[in-house]
Amino acid sequence: MSVYDATKVSPQMGGNIFLAGAVPCRHEKNPILKADFDPALKVAEQANGVNLQIKFDKAWSLEKKRPHVTKDLLGTVIIPKLQYENADGSPVSIDADYFGKLRNAANPTPGPFEVPGDGLLEIKVW
């Protein structure tokens, strides 16, 4: 993420988990650092689709509080000076995860999956 350290415009990012020695950029707010945790990432293409294998610790969901991502949190886009919106013009609010499961609005799980489980998981992504 260090490529973002030198940007002229400060990117907005926060609440992410950095595993296996990954390091956040200086703009990251409230990161969770687990340098010694090996997520055992694997992507496997199978006859019925593509699966992601990953180790997940559901305690990460409780370790630090993260805000619900909405147009208010995202603010205004710098160049057009407009707020973020969906394709239909409605305000952005990330209420669901990758699979459509409702997010915990009070403290959403970091990443694309809302509380996917604990331990070594196999998740069919498509």
Image (tube, rainbow, N blue to C red):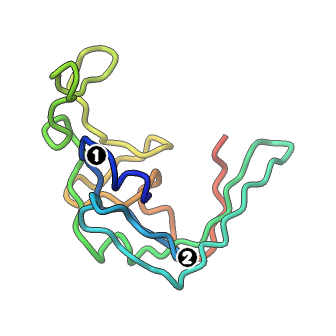
Q: Is residue 22 left or right of residue 82?
A: right
Whole-angstrom CA distance, mark 2 to mark 1, is 23 Å
Which quarter of the rendering shows the C terminus?
top right
Identify the residue position indicated by label 2 in the image: 20
Image location (x, y in percent) of residue 108: 30, 57
> In the visual, does 108 lie left or right of 76?
right
Residue for point 29% across, 63% down: 26
Residue 4 vs residue 89: left or right?
Answer: right
Toward the top, the furthest residue is 88
Q: Which mark is residue 120?
A: none
Please give the name of the residue rendered at 47% of the width and 54% of the height, measured from the top-left corner: 113
Helix, strand or loop under label 1? loop
What residue appears at the point 73 percent right and 55 percent down from the top-left corner?
43
Amino acid type at image mark 2: Ala
Q: Could you tell me which secondary element the residue under label 2 belongs to?
A: loop
Q: Nearer the viewer, mark 2 or mark 1?
A: 1
In the picture of the structure, the residue carrying the numbered disc 1 is 11
Q: Earlier in the sequence, mark 2 or mark 1?
A: 1
Q: Is residue 14 above or below residue 126?
A: below
Neighbour class for label 1 at 10 Å: few (<14), some, many (≥20)?
A: few
Identity of the residue drawn at 81% across and 48% down:
45
Residue 83 drawn at (x, y percent): 17, 26
Q: Is residue 5 left or right of residue 55?
A: left
